[in-house]
């Protein structure tokens, strides 16, 4: 039956993880996947997650029954509150819906799938930033929504191309869908300022575009969960109806537990109910109902004041180590007098740095130095530590000079 089937290309990010794992060189460095690592280069189970683990193990009322189709109520409510803020008017007005999804990817998929069926403007395109996380295109194209790009990264300034971005929003057909990263942009680590968000919102509003935020890194950008939610809260305050995909993979270190949420801000409580009902109908046909464990960990922490504070401290530990590594890398490149300007390493925020290294340079890094990073020059800062940062800087120095 399948004689003519063509092989699909491997996923670029997970292929890197596999190549790294298969590499036997002792100095190998993995700067590919966006997953936190300790100073020892090891995955980190957050201490607050361990505490929540114990609480769950000791809870005699828990069982392995199905969750409702839209997921665990406490988790959905706490997730929406985390991103919109406890004082959100939209929450008080009862027009915020939520669906527990298979982490960030599942939340983006669920929102995209809903739009493919119910967005009133037929054939509307989804605009994604250039560059963006590769899965964005795959997800939207997968549900049949045409994908176009808006400029985001300016290679000359190694910063935001605001003019290009606003221009694309202006010239897009009215009512297009725009996928925006609310904080810690993946892969560039460059975020708009509050004033730039105001300009973006102005155009989005004037053109009647639909806002779809993908928030995978709340807590990694500014060091404050509230500040990282600024753009989302600002849009909601201005009256936008919008979707927010939330991942708890990074900020809880729950990568394999697939804990995520799609928060829906609708015009009225009644419309919210109808949207949720359609999402439930679609979710039933894809995953039936979401897995419980990760969501229980998250809701245990989010609904307990003491654990929440501890979580904030755990998040600071991760964010600060990354900041420290940015500085260490910048200092090494400066010490080596590596040609070029490297300020963007310390200016960018979040898990990633968009180094400006070219695809041929990345190839040499991989083949000669056993350093693994995506072809677009993105590095996951968390893969660096005080033992490998000098080695990496020397490797960068070599590829830049040769
Ligand atoms: C990444 O960008 O490295 C992460 O979001 C992991 C993934 O799923 O691609």
Image: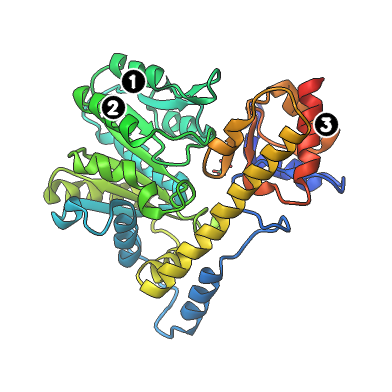
Is tag 1's residue or tag 2's residue first in the polypeptide sequence?
Answer: 1
Give the secondary structure at mark 3: helix
Find disc 3 in the rendering and name its residue: 367
* Cβ–Cβ under 8 Å for marks 1 and 2: yes
Find disc 1 in the rendering and name its residue: 166
> Which x, y percent locates residue 109?
41, 41
Residue at the spot x=65%, y=59% of the render? 43
- Horizontal placement of 176 versus 376: left or right? left
Relative vertical location of residue 65 with respect to residue 391 in this rendering, above or below:
below
For the image, the number of numbered tags is: 3
> Which x, y percent locates residue 220?
49, 49
Q: Nearer the viewer, residue 115 or 225?
A: 225
Relative vertical location of residue 165 with respect to residue 91 in this rendering, above or below:
above
Residue at the spot x=47%, y=41% of the render? 184
> Which x, y percent locates residue 155?
55, 20
Q: Quadrant of the C terminus?
A: top right
Cα separation, mark 3 vs mark 1, equals 40 Å
Give the secondary structure at mark 1: helix
Q: Nearer the viewer, residue 29 or 346?
A: 346
Relative vertical location of residue 291 with respect to residue 148 in this rendering, above or below:
below
> Which x, y percent locates residue 95?
17, 51
Residues packed near mark 1 inside 10 Å, few (<14), some (14 to 19) or many (20 plus): many
Residue 199 image label? 2
Note whether residue 286 is visible.
no
Q: Nearer the viewer, mark 3 or mark 2?
A: 2
């Amino acid at each position: 039956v399948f004689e003519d089937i063509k092989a699909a290309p491997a996923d670029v990010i997970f292929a890197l993880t596999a190549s790294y794992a298969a590499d036997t060189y002792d100095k190998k460095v993995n700067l590919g996947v966006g997953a936190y690592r300790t100073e020892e280069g090891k995955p980190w189970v957050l201490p607050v997650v361990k505490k929540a683990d114990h609480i769950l193990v000791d809870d005699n009322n828990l069982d392995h029954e199905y969750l409702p189709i839209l997921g665990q109520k406490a988790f959905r409510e706490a997730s929406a509150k985390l991103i919109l803020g406890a004082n959100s008017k939209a929450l008080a007005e009862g027009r915020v819906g939520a669906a527990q999804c298979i982490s960030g990817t599942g939340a983006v998929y669920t929102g995209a799938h809903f739009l493919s069926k119910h967005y009133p403007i037929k054939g509307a395109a989804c605009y994604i930033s250039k560059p963006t996380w590769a899965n964005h295109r795959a997800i939207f194209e997968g549900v049949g929504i045409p994908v176009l790009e808006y400029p985001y990264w300016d290679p000359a300034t190694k910063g935001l191309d605001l003019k290009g971005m606003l221009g694309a929003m202006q010239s897009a057909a009215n009512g297009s869908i725009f996928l925006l990263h609310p904080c810690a942009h993946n892969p560039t680590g460059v975020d708009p300022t509050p004033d730039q968000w105001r300009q973006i919102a102005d155009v989005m509003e004037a053109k009647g575009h639909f806002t779809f935020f993908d928030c995978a890194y709340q807590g990694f950008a500014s060091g404050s969960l509230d500040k990282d939610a600024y753009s989302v809260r600002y849009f909601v305050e201005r009256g936008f109806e919008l979707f927010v995909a939330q991942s708890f993979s990074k900020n809880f270190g729950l990568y394999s537990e697939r804990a995520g949420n799609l928060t829906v801000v609708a015009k009225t409580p009644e419309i919210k109910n109808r949207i949720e009902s359609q999402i439930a109908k679609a979710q039933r046909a894809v995953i039936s109902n979401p897995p419980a464990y990760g969501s229980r960990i998250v809701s245990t922490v989010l609904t307990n004041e003491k654990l929440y504070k501890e979580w904030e401290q755990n998040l600071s530990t991760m964010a600060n180590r990354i900041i420290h590594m940015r500085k260490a890398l910048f200092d090494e490149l400066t010490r080596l007098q590596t040609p070029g300007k490297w300020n963007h390493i310390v200016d960018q925020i979040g898990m990633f740095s968009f180094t400006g290294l070219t695809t041929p340079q990345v190839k040499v890094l991989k083949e000669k130095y056993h350093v693994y990073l995506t072809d677009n020059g993105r590095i996951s800062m968390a893969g660096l530590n005080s033992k490998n940062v000098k080695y990496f800087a020397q490797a960068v120095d070599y590829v830049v000079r040769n």
